[in-house]
Image: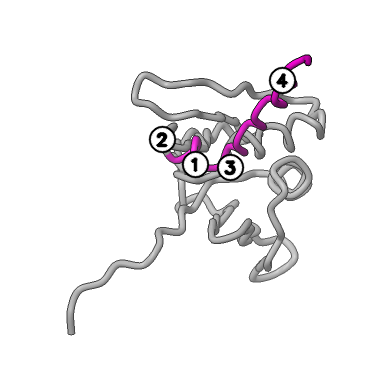
């Protein structure tokens, strides 16, 4: 059987269910897919997703360290920026940057010290820009 890799599912450290939901679901627009605890006093493990991007958030000590950094390649980063900016999240108002490596980048920091950079190649971004309307023809006077 040939070797084949499937998409990576990062595990990010979290400490507080309400703050995690506020950030990932309320601010970034992810869907809470499921959550699990072994009992009511156990740490939470949950999955959030948006489109094909899946993230696992874990309160378990050994699963991940706070301060992770992810780069998510995507299309539509300017639209994502407009969407999250409109939500007026009180703990962060990220900007949209053009990077030296020819991407447009939106960087967010979650409440647990993790950083996610959403990046789109500028050459790919241009394909999604609506064409400019051509100017109206000028009528010649008789």
**Marks 3 and 1: which is nearer the front?**
1
At x 41%, y 35%, the residue is: 123
Q: Position of residue 138 (x, y in %)?
A: 72, 20
Q: Which mark is residue 76?
A: 3
Q: Which sits in the foreground, 22 or 54? A: 54
Identify the mark nearer the N-term, 3 or 2.
3
Q: Quadrant of the N terminus?
A: bottom left
Q: Which residue is mark 2?
A: 123
**Residue 137, placed above or below residue 31:** above
The kind of secondary structure element at disc 4 is loop
Q: Farthest residue in the bottom direction?
A: 1
Cα gap from disc 3 to disc 1, whole angstroms: 10 Å
Is the residue 86 above or below the residue 142 in the image? below
Q: Nearer the viewer, mark 1 or mark 4?
A: 4
Mark 4 and mark 3: Cα distance apart in space = 35 Å
According to the picture, the residue beneath numbered tag 4 turns out to be 138
Between the C-alphas of marks 1 and 4, the distance is 29 Å
**Mark 1 or mark 4: whose residue is earlier in sequence:** 1
User: Would residue 4 appear left or right of 58 to someone viewing this image?
Assistant: left
Find the magenta span and give its range: 124-142
Q: Residues within 10 Å of mark 3 (few under 14, many from 20)?
A: some
Q: Is residue 17 magenta?
A: no
Which label sits in the foreground, 4 or 2? 4
Question: Which residue does the image show at 56% across and 30% down from the upper left?
Answer: 106
Tell me the SS state at disc 1. helix
**Position in image of residue 118 (x %, y %):** 52, 37
Instruction: Please give the residue where the numbered disc 1 appears in the rendered image.
Output: 127
The spot of residue 20 in percent (x, y) is 70, 45
């Amino acid at each position: 059987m040939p070797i084949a890799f499937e998409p990576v599912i990062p595990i990010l450290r979290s400490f507080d269910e309400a703050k995690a939901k506020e950030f990932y679901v309320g601010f970034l627009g992810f869907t809470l897919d499921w959550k699990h605890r072994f009992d009511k006093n156990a740490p939470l493990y949950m999955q959030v997703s948006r489109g094909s991007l899946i993230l696992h958030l874990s309160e378990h000590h050994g699963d991940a360290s706070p301060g992770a950094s992810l780069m998510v390649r995507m299309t539509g980063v300017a639209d994502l920026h407009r969407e999250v900016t409109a939500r007026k999240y009180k703990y962060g108002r990220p900007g949209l940057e053009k990077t030296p490596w020819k991407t447009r980048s939106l960087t967010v920091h979650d409440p647990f010290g993790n950083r996610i950079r959403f990046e789109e190649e500028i050459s790919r971004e241009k394909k999604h820009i609506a064409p400019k309307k051509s100017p109206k023809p000028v009528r010649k006077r008789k």
